[in-house]
Amino acid sequence: VLNEDLWLVEGQQERMINGANVWNWPVAYDKLGARYRIWRDALERGNKKLPFERSIPTYVEGM
């Protein structure tokens, strides 16, 4: 995970050097990294319902 975080920080640093406001213009992998950490933390805590989890319809025979 540390390498993933480093990769995210390096990307933000590069955008800041190029004049971008990283807080106003997040890119997909910025959001993905944050969502992953929220999900991973919930999993480690043993939460029964994980964040960002969609319910998958189940097939019931005869319906």
Image: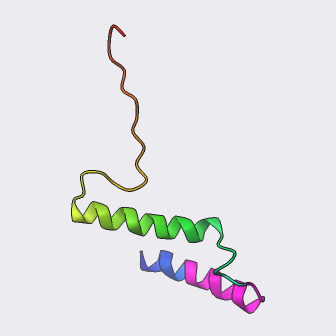
Q: How far across and down, in percent of the image, does residue 8 sit?
A: 56, 78
Instruction: Give the farthest residue toward the front.
Output: 24
Q: Please, is residue 7 above or below residue 28 in the view?
A: below
Q: How far across and down, in percent of the image, does residue 51 sit?
A: 38, 56
Q: Main secondary structure of the magenta part?
A: helix
Is the N terminus in the top left, top right, bottom left or bottom right quadrant? Answer: bottom left
* Magenta segment includes 49: no
Q: How far across and down, in percent of the image, does residue 61 sit?
A: 32, 12
Left or right of 4? Residue 27 is: right
Instruction: Give the farthest residue toward the top.
Output: 62
Region in magenta: 8-20
Instruction: Give the farthest residue toward the left.
Output: 46
Is the C terminus in the top left, top right, bottom left or bottom right quadrant? Answer: top left
Residue drawn at (38%, 62%) of the image: 39
Residue drawn at (50%, 69%) of the image: 33
Q: Please, is residue 47 above or below residue 22 in the view?
A: above
Q: How far across and down, in percent of the image, does residue 43 sit?
A: 29, 60
Instruction: Give the farthest residue toward the right.
Output: 18
Quarter where residue 18 is shown: bottom right
Left or right of 5? Residue 29 is: right
